[in-house]
Image: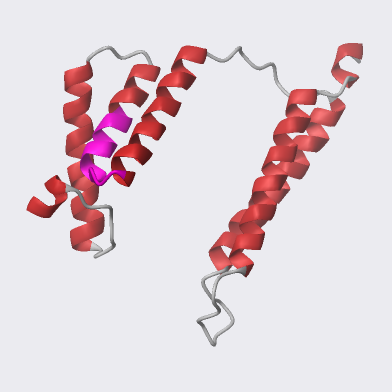
């Protein structure tokens, strides 16, 4: 047996703790939902299933990390992480400022593509735009769900 393999993996334990916290928050939040169904399954059912799944993953990850048997992780690419977080911040800002779902989605797609090494910004914005329009039409028009509207969405 490899003596290095028996040392606990602190990063893996931290990830397990993070998963457990997310599971607890989801479980608590599901309990705050109004009970609207007389049949026993209400709006809290799906979040509770997700919370249980995350808790199981947290326990399994903790057990493997405690034994030091997690696979080797590669170093993260900080530039890619910054692009993805920047895309998410832009998405939140655009939607929050009333820019709408479609442009926000296009920018998030382009930033994520850049994080994965693609360097064709105009093409990525166009692809993101088409995906955003498709998602908007599917959810807002076909499924009649409410998505954030901006000037562009009001034209559709």
Tell me, yes or no, whether the highlighted magenta stretch contains residue 102: yes
* Apparent side of residue 20 relative to residue 30 in the rendered image (left or right): right
Classify residue 28 by image quadrant.
Answer: bottom right
| Image coords of residue 48 (percent x, y) | 62, 62
Q: Is residue 45 above or below residue 108?
A: below
Q: Which residue shows up at 80% across the image and 23% down it?
A: 9
Tell me, yes or no, whether the highlighted magenta stretch contains residue 98: yes
* Apparent side of residue 127 relative to residue 110 in the rendered image (left or right): left
Classify residue 114 by image quadrant.
Answer: top left
Q: Which residue shows up at 72% across the image and 42% down it?
A: 58
Classify residue 113 by image quadrant.
Answer: top left
Q: Is residue 156 visible?
A: no
| Residues rendered magenta in the picture | 97-109
Q: How is the image coloured?
A: secondary structure
Q: In this view of the protein, which residue sits in the foreground, 145 or 95?
A: 95
Q: Is residue 49 above or below residue 128?
A: below
- In the rendered view of the protein, which quadrant contains the N terminus? top right
What type of secondary structure mainly makes up the magenta span? helix
Q: Which residue sits furthest front? A: 97
| Image coords of residue 29 (percent x, y) | 60, 61
| Image coords of residue 90 (percent x, y) | 34, 32
Q: Which residue sits furthest left? A: 155
Query: How many marks do you count on the picture?
Result: 0
Q: Is residue 62 above or below residue 38?
A: above
| Image coords of residue 152 (percent x, y) | 13, 45
Q: Is residue 58 visible?
A: yes
Q: In this view of the protein, which residue sits in the foreground, 118 or 102?
A: 102
Q: Which residue shows up at 14% across the image and 47% down it?
A: 151
């Amino acid at each position: 047996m490899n003596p290095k393999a028996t040392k606990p993996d602190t990063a893996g334990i931290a990830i397990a703790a993070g998963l457990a916290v997310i599971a607890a928050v989801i479980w608590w939040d599901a309990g705050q939902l109004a009970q609207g169904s007389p049949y026993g399954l209400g709006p809290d059912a799906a979040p509770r299933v997700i919370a249980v799944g995350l808790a199981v993953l947290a326990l399994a990850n903790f057990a493997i990390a405690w034994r030091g048997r997690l696979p080797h992780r590669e170093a993260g690419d900080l530039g890619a992480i910054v692009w993805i977080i920047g895309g998410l911040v832009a998405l939140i800002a655009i939607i929050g400022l009333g820019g709408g779902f479609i442009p926000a989605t296009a920018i998030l797609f382009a930033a994520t593509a850049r994080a994965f090494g693609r360097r064709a910004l105009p093409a990525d914005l166009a692809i993101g735009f088409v995906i955003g329009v498709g998602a908007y039409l599917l959810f807002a028009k076909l499924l009649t769900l409410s998505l954030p509207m901006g000037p562009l969405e009001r034209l559709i």
